[in-house]
Structures are given as C-alpha cells and as structure tokens.
Amino acid sequence: MTQSFVSIRAGASALSHIQQNGLTADDIGLLMGASGGPKWFVLQGIDEWLFGEFFADKKQPLNTLGTSAGAWRFASLGQEDPVAASRLFAELYSHQTYSARPDQREITAEAEKLLHRYVPESAVSSILSQTRVHHHFIAVRCLRSTAKEGRRQALGLLSSALANSINRSWLGRYYERVVFHHPASNLALSKGWNDLPTQHVALTERNFQPALLATGSIPMVLEGVRDIPGAPRGVYRDGGITDYHFDIDLSGVDGLTLYPHFHHEAIPGWFDKRLKWRRSTGRNWPNTIFISPTEAFLNKLPYRKIPDRNDFAQLDAAQRIQYWSKAIDAGRWMADELQTTLANGRLADRVSLWD
C-alpha cells in the first residue's frame, strides 16, 4: 500500500461541499497560515503550488489571514512573481546565521534585513495596488509590563500566561489584537471577533513593513516594534501570542477556509501549547479544510520531526541549513500528492471529518 504524506480533514459543511461538488479555487474564501517559526518549511511545496497554480485563475478575491510566519509566507502573494518571492523567503529564512550568542538587537537586525530583501518597497506597492489578494495579518499591541523589555517583559509574560490558563479572554488585559488589512478588504471575515479586544488598521506603504515585522517579533527574542504608522501608539509583538494557530470566529468568511498546517492539531494561542484541552477543530470551523503532514511523512524527515527554533541551538549552522533544506524539499511530496488527488477527482475519497 502506498504511503500517504498528506492528511486532509474538513469540518462538516466543508466535507459536504467536497462530497457533492468537489473543490475549485473559487470555493476558497480564506487562506489561513499559523505562527510557528521554521515549522512552515514543510508547507513550502504546497505554498508554491497554491500561489503559482491552484489560485492562478481564481475569479473572486482571495482573503489571507496569518500571524508571524504565516503572515510572512503570504506576503509573497500580490508580488509580481509570488512563487519566486516564496522561494526567496524560504531561501533567506533557512540560511540565517548568527553569532555564537546573539542578543535581541542582532536577531532583530537580521529579521529587518531579511524583510527588506523579501518585501522591498517596490513589492509593498505591488501588493497594495492589486486587489486579487486581500491580506490580513495580526500583531498584538502590548499592555502593562508586556510592553517593556528585559525582566519586566518576562514578568508580564508570566502573568499573562497565568491569566490565560484560567480564562483565555483574560489575555485581553495584557494584549490587544490588531488586524492589519489590505485597504480593499471589507473586513467581513473578522466581524464576529469579540473574544479579545480587537482593532483594525488599514495597510499602507508606510506601515506594511513594520506591521509585518511586528507580527513575527517573538517576545524575549526580537525587539518589539514601536508606534506603527496609522496604528494606536505602543509596542507591537508577535500575533501568535493571541492567535498562534487561531481560535477565531470564521462564520463571516464568504466561502470555504483552506488551512494548510504543519501540525496535526490547531493550538489557539501561544500560551495554550501545554493546555491540551484547548484545541480548535472542525466543530469550531465547519467550513474549514485542514491539511497537515501524516506520521509517515514525519518519519521520512531527518530526525523524524519538522524544523523548529530549537534547531538553532542544537545543530551547527551547516547541519541546520542542510536539514532545513531537506525539509523544504520533502514538503514537495505533500504538494505533489495533494495536486494529484485533486487532478484525479479523488478528494472526496481522501477527506475525512475533522471533529
């Protein structure tokens, strides 16, 4: 029996749609991408296929929603050549190197350099002037001591983690979700987001780069981004703090949500990793198609795991870059399998209920 490298699950409504109608690009209203550092490398092949082929002839605008690495991945869309931009991002990210003991300034400077090569000002202009893709990405505006650096920030993180463990809505005492959105977006997808304090800020040529930097600014690792133009004054950090793999209301999405993910489950917020009872599923998102690697795929990878930030500490630069490059290449097995499944009209046979 041929091994499968792709798990395809769907909420009840999405499953019914696929069984009755199959799936086309125009069925998809939202493309979603999670935080997770280099874990997304295994999705690179799927991104290239989606950006270059599957969505190429889509008639209606595509909404994207991402935090941290998810938002950075989708910044390829709307550029002159989204596949080339996506490959450049994977190349730049996977070949990052630092000194033996980098501080926040060094890591932030490296991120800024990567950002300006991947999404230069000319690319920002292209993204904002086109209307085929409506970008949305989330950063958090930090409140109380979470806006500080150093030890006071650490105490704020500890306090907010404790509050979150009691009640997820209490995160709103420490962070405000800020949705940076394409100026053409009608914001319908976020109309029901009342779980946490949420603001919306239109993307402009002045704030696109700092907002994208902010959504990937991991606490205690990168410096926060201060006073983003057009947004409320304050310090902004990684959107994954509140929306790691998301737990938001998607009922406002016009169409189905496609969620290629690197993990078999969706963890709502950054502080929920160890709270096993908090997971998002198709019960929350009946219109969502959830694509992830199988155990068979993971077993084919070096070290039998997907890349993560710990690789910086556990491998030397040459080993890490080689490993990450192999993970990117392996991700194309997933893309090939998914593409073949759709082309052969076998998606209805492969998809299962995400419950």
Image: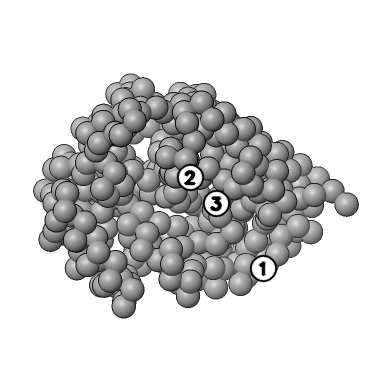
Q: Position of residue 120 (x, y in %)?
A: 33, 23
Is tag 1's residue or tag 2's residue first in the polypeptide sequence?
2
Query: Which residue is denoted by mark 3 in the rendering?
Result: 261
Query: Which residue is denoted by mark 1 in the rendering?
Result: 353
Quadrant placement of the C terminus: bottom right
Secondary element at tag 1:
strand
Query: Which residue is denoted by mark 2 in the rendering?
Result: 308
Residue positioned 29% across, 33% down in the render: 102
Secondary element at tag 3:
loop
- Asked which quadrant contains residue 327, the reply is top right
Closest to the camera, between mark 3 and mark 2, is 2
Q: Amino acid at mark 1?
A: Leu
Q: Amino acid at mark 3?
A: His
Label 2 neighbour load within 10 Å: few <14, some 14-19, many 20+: some
Q: CA distance from mark 3 to mark 2?
A: 14 Å
Q: CA distance from mark 1 to mark 2?
A: 29 Å
For the residue pair 304 and 130, the one nearer the viewer reads as 304
Q: Position of residue 208 (x, y in %)?
A: 28, 36
